[in-house]
Image: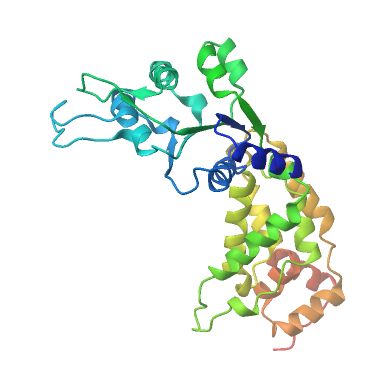
Amino acid sequence: MKDQQKMLEIASLSNIPVLLQGESGAGKEVAARFIHNHGPRRDSPFVALNCSSIPKSLAESILEGSVKGAFTGAVEEKLGLVRSAEGGTLFLDEIGELPLETQSKLLRILQEKAVTPVGAAQSIPVNFRLICATNRNLKMEIADGNFRADLFFRINVFPIEIPPLRARRDFDVVASDLWREARNQAMVRIDGTDDRNHQHNLSTEEMELLKACPWPGNVRQLKNILQRYSVLKPYDVSLTEILTQEFSVPKLYEKNICSIYVTDFLRKRKKKPTLTDIEETLLLCKGNKCKAARKLGISRGSLCYQLQKGRVKIAS
């Protein structure tokens, strides 16, 4: 990530358009805010828009605004997102999903450096810094006729590739930071005691389990997992159980290998408990087989089978 960090720092010193490319959840908006917050426009607005959420019929008014009485229901003047970013940064997320008709409107705004609100007779000059982000290959989108080549050349001035979480060298740092954040947001236990101060840092084994996962949802998915774990950890739910559940539905992701890879890794990683391990764990759990099975990472049926096989009697 160090190369990308340097590129973000360099980009922040200029006003040229930046195109952030990377998988969904990799942190493209975080990178955009970094560029804005470290640049000369830091004290001006940062306006973000997810292009996939723009209805075609409202695209013009959303971007360029409207004057009072321009259409039914227009009871007051609307600035629009472009003018709202005056002096600051306009961040267009998932620009690859912008409809072709809206792409032509955006191209005109960038070429003329002005907007024409709906119902207005004259254009209004605007001054903003443009940052775009996409998880699509825009060159392929151009070849397929889904993206305008002239718009691409307008926004692809300073491209920066944001690496996926699985390719980042600072995974330990990211996971540790997210874990600290998750701990601070942890819920108060049912018995009324606040367990946040008693949760330790991620262990070496826990970190290795996390690093072994493919993380198709990137940082966003890792954050969700750690928040879930911080809440369930006091109730003897292991990270292994949470990861197995998370990656057990391959249809949620593009690559089915996610489920196969993680499940196989966890099976190999988890040593089969010995009879001694089972006896000691049952003693700690005061004979509670369900709780002991969870701690050992096996099913209750498997635990009962091992007890029967070893002819172990549990003291009541």
User: Residue placed at 21% from the left, 22% from the top?
Assistant: 120
Residue 29 seen anywhere in this rendered image of the structure: yes
Q: Is residue 72 above or below residue 103?
A: below
Q: Is residue 128 above or below residue 154?
A: below
Q: Is residue 105 above or below residue 29?
A: above
Depth order, front residue of 20/179: 20
Residue 142 x, y percent position in the rendering:
56, 13
Residue 146 seen anywhere in this rendered image of the structure: no
Q: Is residue 56 above or below residue 270?
A: above
User: Residue placed at 16% from the left, 37% from the top?
Assistant: 76
Dividing the image into 4 quarters, which one contains the N terminus?
top right
User: Residue placed at 40% from the left, 21% from the top?
Assistant: 109
User: Residue placed at 64% from the left, 63% from the top?
Assistant: 179
Q: Is residue 201 left or right of residue 116?
A: right
Depth order, front residue of 301/109: 109
Q: Give the image quarter of residue 53.
A: top left
Residue 277 x, y percent position in the rendering:
83, 75
Q: Is residue 127 left or right of residue 172?
A: left
Residue 216 x, y percent position in the rendering:
65, 41
Number of marks:
0
Q: Is residue 200 left or right of residue 146?
A: right
Depth order, front residue of 177/269: 177
Residue 83 x, y percent position in the rendering:
34, 34
Q: How is the image coloured?
A: rainbow
Dividing the image into 4 quarters, which one contains the C terminus?
bottom right
